[in-house]
Image: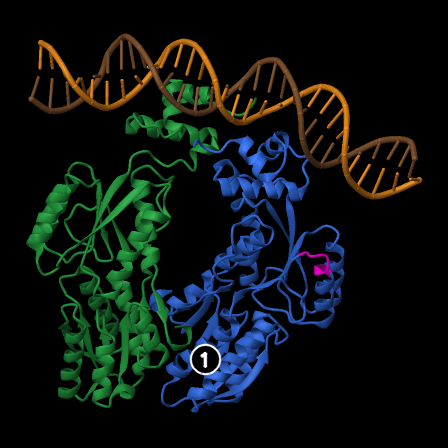
Chain colours: A blue, B green, C orange, D brown
Amino acid sequence: MGKPTARDLAVAAGVSLSTVDRVLNNRGGVTEDKERRVLDCARRLGIDRALNQRPARTLRIAVLLQAPDNPFHAAVQANFEAANRDFPHYNLQFRIHHIDPARPAMTVDLVNALSATSDGLVVVSPQNDAVAAALRAFGRGGKPVMTFATDIRDAGRYAYVGPDNRKAGRVAGDLMGRLLGREGGDVVVISGMLSMIGHEEREMGFRAVLRERYPRCRVADVLESMERGERAGDLVFAALKSNPRIRGIYNASAGAQPVVDAMKALGKRDAVVFITHELTEDRRRLLREGMIDAIIDQDPALEVRTAVEALAARFGRRDGPPASLVTPIHIHMIENG
Amino acid sequence: MGKPTARDLAVAAGVSLSTVDRVLNNRGGVTEDKERRVLDCARRLGIDRALNQRPARTLRIAVLLQAPDNPFHAAVQANFEAANRDFPHYNLQFRIHHIDPARPAMTVDLVNALSATSDGLVVVSPQNDAVAAALRAFGRGGKPVMTFATDIRDAGRYAYVGPDNRKAGRVAGDLMGRLLGREGGDVVVISGMLSMIGHEEREMGFRAVLRERYPRCRVADVLESMERGERAGDLVFAALKSNPRIRGIYNASAGAQPVVDAMKALGKRDAVVFITHELTEDRRRLLREGMIDAIIDQDPALEVRTAVEALAARFGRRDGPPASLVTPIHIHMIENG
DNA sequence: TCAATCTTGACGAGATCTCTTCAAACCGGG
DNA sequence: CCCGGTTTGAAGAGATCTCGTCAAGATTGA
């Protein structure tokens, strides 16, 4: 038997030759379900033209995250913007919207406004009941809501894409325990905003490991930097000054340089173990210079790619879902920075 | 202007319509350079059929490595075998040949025999002058020789794909220094075969870091397991028994379970830091059980993929070379095993 | 050198695709 | 129910592709 022809495809999909032609040549005027049926059959029949076929309809995905003063959010934003170019075959259009995590009411308004113009949502936001309710409402029509990097409870989300933050915290905790060694010591935890589920989970994981395996280490304080690097530095400065027994700092959030500066100002850089997250360029430099002892990294590029693939799968523009929606955690130290 | 037609392509590539047709329909009877020219022009003209085009000629790549009793080599072998299925668009055929690292003469004979039937070579082998000469001869006709996981000097290789082994050793050394803490202590290094350049480099990197930054740590012994796990266990047993000051073991080679058994037999599991390579299933289990303190991993799947892409690029079956031929190094500890 | 084989181009018949036109069916809103 | 717009299918003309056949070089090996 020869290779499958357009006529075979028409029969298989139960449509006319004309419709097949319209779909295969992206000529429009075909309802979505019929188009999908034709493309599905084409893939099954092994008609390669269908593989690179760019779906006619552009799906608009709104991405909600805070302004990119935080380098992690900057990387996420850049990668989502790049995704508009990098995945032409999915024909998804990502539009960035900045939200202020401290103003949930504005986020709610934005979500409500977007439900008219967006086919899906990617959200990085702290836990908040009103926001969760707005997301549930958005998803009511069958549109996917994806939480990203930090989960949101009761949002009726389609999926969470990002690291297992509890595990990330446990990795940090274990490293802290091991690097502090036999003597142990007091540890200060700086969290971004504990209302970010991801940050809360990191902190819980961190504490859990110390409790389970490193009884000589004690979490002396858990402080919130409100995602402001300067504030993180100030908190560390104050903590180190008031409590000389502090031997470890775990900063799960913004502000690497300010923390290093605080340690240096008190002449304690070498006496304290400093562990943080996100391998950005400036942190990589600090790591190589020995100013940071370990960085727990989630790969934003991979996370965005995973999110894109998962959304494409959700919209039937990809065969199956990605292997895993939980993205890996990497340890970086001075020699593999 | 309309979309480019086969006639345009014929003009652009400077061949007849017939030849274009033969290439586009994989009908054979076209020389390689003409085929490449047609496909290149097709890509440039944006003729999508050419993208998924499987090249007509199957290129035979011989993969030379030792028998898969070592789990790393087993993983490499499995991944190369899988590559025969996973990269149909490159149409490369990988054939595995087992060599005995202790019998270079046999390797030489094999390389000479393969030069008649293979279009390229991937080699995992210890350094040896006769082998290097044979590889140089193989490459004389323009066929690529790729060293993999461990480099070979003076082999006239086209590329080395694998981790930066010196860096891998430095990562291990830094971890050892940090985990041993202030007190430091004696460390035993078990290498597979020091004639494997990669193993030599690991050992050098490991020692260099201890020398530079951890003066309290001393490399008491460098032993060769000859890639036999049992022997690694015996060496560790003997070393621990004869030198009670040993507080660290760095095994850059086969034998995780035997080493753990040796430590346990002497009641020293908790008194000694054990660092090794390769996150295989059984090592992952040992890591989770706390029997191994850290594993430095190179991802064999990624390495093989990189090798395949690099070869495809070399044969003009891919746009550019992969971003990096140096594959990353990952640290795994109990919480991110 | 000669014969066999391979490569390339030309040609043409039929298959297949592309695109336009037209009409019937469908659908939502007055 | 009617109206305007959209979706679907049918048909046909021409463009384009597919594939077999043939012949003229080119290459190779004896």
Label 1: element kind: helix
Report the side of B90 relative to A280 (left or right): left
User: Subunit of mark 1?
Assistant: A
Residue B45, placed above or below residue B263: above
Front residue (pair A97, A42)? A42
Q: Residues within 10 Å of mark 1 (few under 14, many from 20)?
A: many
Image coordinates for residue B100, horizontal then vertical, percent? 12, 59
Front residue (pair B196, A321)? A321
Q: Which residue is drawn at 24% across and 88% down?
A: B268
Report the side of B252 relative to A183 (left or right): left
Front residue (pair A256, C27)? C27
Magenta span of residues? A138-143
Number of numbered callouts drawn: 1
Q: In which quarter of the image is residue B178?
A: bottom left
Q: Residue at x 56, y 79 (%)?
A: A235
Query: Label 1, on which residue?
Result: A173
Query: Which quarter of the figure is the N terminus of chain A placed in?
Result: top left
Please tell me whether residue A224 belongs to the stretch shown in magenta. no
Q: Which amino acid does label 1 sit on?
A: Gly
Image coordinates for residue A81, horizontal then vertical, percent? 57, 50
> Extreme front residue here?
A1
- Whether residue B325 appears in this view of the structure is no
Residue B259, placed above or below residue A53: below
Q: Which residue is drawn at 58% across and 68% down?
A: A150
Query: Which quarter of the figure is the C terminus of chain A placed in?
Result: bottom left
Q: Residue at x 36, y 89 (%)?
A: A182
Front residue (pair C20, B195)? C20
Image coordinates for residue A14, horizontal then vertical, percent? 62, 38
- Whether residue B226 appears in this view of the structure is yes
- Dominant SS type (magenta): loop
Image coordinates for residue B71, horizontal then vertical, percent? 26, 65
